[in-house]
Image (cartoon, grey):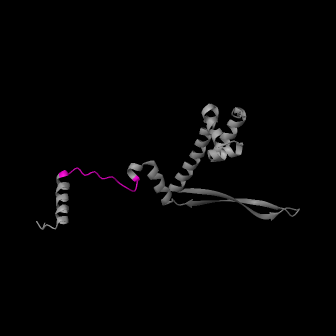
Amino acid sequence: MPKQSNYTSQIHDHIAWALAVEGKTDIQIAEVMGITERTLNNWKKTHESFFQSLKKGKSVADADVVKSLYNRAVGKVVVKNKKVTIEMDSEGNQRPARIETTEQQVPPDVTAAIFWLKNRNPAQWRDRQDVKVDNNEWVSALQSKVNGYKKGEDLSE
């Protein structure tokens, strides 16, 4: 007889969501939970709330990656705050005198842009383009020329 499942929705659904948000794979999630991947897959099939928790967590992680890839593809301005310490108090501790804010332009990344476009609209941006030739007369004439060359015929017309 198979071992009884120790699934508890109040615990396992939250753990699954949290690990999925971190970008963990199903195998990694199973390892953290102390179960096999097979058990995890069974829980997904038999416990809808568990399946939905995993699905929602993975969606959050995927959205973060999409946002990062998009920002990398188009470039962005990064604002950084830096505490400048130039004063000491009476006890010898450093006190932040002011905060400097700097902006740095991160240029677009061509590779990220290409990746984004190929996956967003593959019909238009993939490397290989399918070309359909509709002029059968032209194709037939070209084929006969090629066949003539193969036979050694003089085709200097």
Residue drawn 35% across and 54% down?
129
Residue 60, horizontal then vertical, whole percent: 60, 43
State whether residue 138 is above or below residue 50.
below
Coordinates of residue 38 in the picture (x, y in percent): 63, 40
Lateral position of residue 121 relative to residue 1, left or right: left
The rendered magenta stretch, by its main secondary structure, is classed as loop
Image quadrant in which the C terminus is located: bottom left
| Location of residue 95 by image quarter | bottom right
Nearer-the-camera pick, 109 or 78: 109
Please tell me which residue is depicted at 69% across the width and 42% down the height of the picture: 35
Q: Nearer the viewer, residue 135 or 88?
A: 135
Figure check: 84 above or below 55: below
With 65 as the anchor, is 111 left or right in this view?
A: left
Q: Is residue 151 left or right of residue 74?
A: left
Magenta stretch holds residue 87: no
The x and y percentages for residue 13 are: 68, 36
The reply to whether the magenta stretch includes residue 130 is yes
Say which of 56 and 157 sits in front.
157
x and y, in percent, of residue 8 in the image: 71, 33
Q: Residue furthest right?
A: 91
Residue range highlighted in magenta: 125-136
